[in-house]
Each structure stands twice: as structure tokens, then as C-alpha cells.
Amino acid sequence: MSESSSEFKVWESIPVGDDLGTLDYVLTEKMVADYRRVVDNPHAAYPTVAARHPANLFYRKYASTMRVPNMGHDSEYFNPPVVGKRITIHGRIADKYIRRGNAYIIVEATATDEDGRLIERSKLVGLAREVGKQAAHANIAKKWGA
Amino acid sequence: MAAQLKVGDRLEPVTRNVTEEKMVEFERCVWDRGRNSHSDVNAAKADGISRTIASGQNQMAFLHELLERNFGDAWVYGGKISVRYIHPVYGGDSLTANGTVTEMKDEDGKTRVVLQVWCENQDGRKTSVGTAQAGQPSASRTWFTPAKALAK
């Protein structure tokens, strides 16, 4: 990986397994109602889709050095979150790799509520973009002229 | 009992309109992430694109509805999804979430329905592609319980 020593310097410095710590919030009735209205789904079970748990945990630690625009998600859903319950999310760097010349970071977040119910486990597939070097969505502009 | 699926079956699709206004709201609801390339044109330009694009999670929301409607509790309690976002979605687009059953597999003695899932825009262009799986569809919708009751 000779090219990576300069091109992916920040990406290389982020270790797989890195603990991103925890964040928590109380899911309010308003959050659920707002989400359901915005997505036109009055019964949406997982308003946490809009909360972006992996990205929030990643940016708390790495916002000044790295952007991870969302190329995909691998997610599992166990129990819908309950209004009024505190949700705690815990994150880690689950993997990273280079594919077709692009560096990727996989950020995993696991959400549980105050009663210990497992809510969801979500992995963000992030295209690693070093802050100040590459525009976050330059690939989209190049590919589709966006 | 809900109708059981077999390989080759196609789910009833879900179509939703994406608007600039709802893209902005999506970024603010549940957890406000501030201005970004999904909600603010200047932030989008700073990120290298000329206009705002809907977030991948916005597409994920439509796929969730597709799976909730077609699988009920079988999706909500134990569903899995793997999606890649392959084409930008803009305000004014109309997105349709689709699913086709590709496989039945056994997992811990229970049948899992495996699907190809995707969103496509009004021009028929796929904007996201992936796979999902859940148990056979359930007629139960236990999460429909009103939010106030759930809070008790």
C-alpha cells in the first residue's frame, strides 16, 4: 500500500476497533411524531433511522479530521424504541479497507434503551474524506455531475 | 395469518415524493445535525456538489416502510438490511421502494425470507440497492401501539 502513506494518512491513523464511546438521549413523543410526518409513514417503527447513530458518534471524535459520507448501511433491528425511554448508543470502528482506490471506514453503533432492550445495530459504510483535502461529495459530482 | 412469501414474489411497492422542505426537516427531526449537504445549498457546495441531495437514510426510511408494510412484526423484530446508495436523490424526485424474494433460508430452525431491495426514481433509475431479510410475514403490528401508551 505504498500510495496510502501520503494519500490516506488520516485514514491510516484511525484504528479498527477504536472505541467511539457512548451518547444518550431520551426519545420524545415529538421526535417520533416529527419523523413519522417527515417520512409520510404514520406508523414508522424506527425513528432512529434519522438519528444517524454511527455518524454522530464518529463525528464527535473525528469531525476535525475526517468526513465519512454515507455510501451504505448494514443494519439489524431488534425492538422498536419506546417513547420516554433513554437510548444509549455505543460506537466503534468496525472495519476499514481500500476498494478501487477509495478508502472506507465502517462505523458500528449499537443502541439499547434504559431497560436494557437491544434496539438496533447499524453499520455506516463511510467513504473516508480527509478534511481540507477532498470535498466530501466530490465523487458524486465527478460521477453524476451533481 | 399473513400470506406467506415464496421465491419470485414481489412486495407491494411504496412510492414517496422527496421535497426540499422534507429533506431539511429530515435533518432536523430526532437529532438535529445542523446545516449540511442534505439541507443547505451552501453546505452542499462546500462539499463539492451544486445542490442538496437527500441523505441515504432518507431512502432507508422508505425501505423501512416497504418492509414494515409487507412483513409487519417479522421485520420490526429481527429484520436485517444491507443497502448501498448508488445514485443521488434530489428534491422533486419521486422514489419507489421495491423488493423481490430471492431465497428462503433456514436460520436456527426458522425460515428467513431473503430479498433484493432497491429504490428507484421517477425515471426508473435505481438510487439504492441491497438485500434484506426477515421471517415470513406476520399479520401482527404490535408496534402500532400509540406512543402515549408505550410511554407508560
Image (cartoon, rainbow, N blue to C red):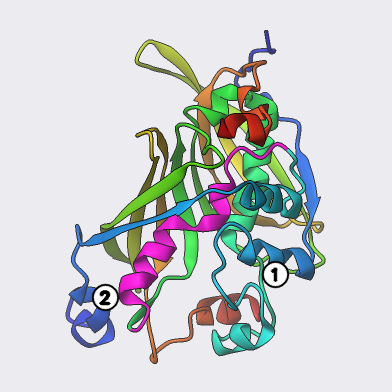
Q: For residue A13, which numbered disc appears in the image?
A: none
Element at label 1: helix
Q: Amino acid at mark 2?
A: Trp
Quadrant, the C terminus of chain B: top right
Q: Are marks 1 and 2 on the same chain?
A: no
| Chain letter of disc 1 in the image | B
Decide: marks 1, 2 in contact (CB < 8 A)?
A: no
What is the quadrant of residue A43 in the picture? top right
The residue closer to the viewer here, A17 or B103, is: A17
Q: Is residue B75 left or right of residue B15?
A: left
Nearest the camera: B141 or A123?
B141
In x, y percent, where is residue A34? Answer: 70, 53
Mark 1–mark 2 Cα distance, whole angstroms, equals 30 Å
Mark 1 belongs to which amino acid? Val
Q: Is residue B149 visible?
A: yes
Q: Residue at x 68, y 13 (%)?
A: B2
**In the rendering, at what x and y percent does residue B41 appear?**
68, 84
In magenta, the rendered stretch is: A43-64
Q: Secondary structure at mark 2?
A: helix
Q: Which residue is mark 2?
A: A11
Q: Which residue is mark 1?
A: B24
The foreground one among B30 and A136 is: B30
Residue B127 is left or right of residue B12, and the answer is left
Report the residue at 72% width, 51% height from top.
A39
Near mark 2 (Cα within 10 A), the count class, few <14, some 14-19 or many ≥20, is many
Residue at 78% x, 68% y is B21
If the image is split into quadrants, where does the N terminus of chain B sit? top right
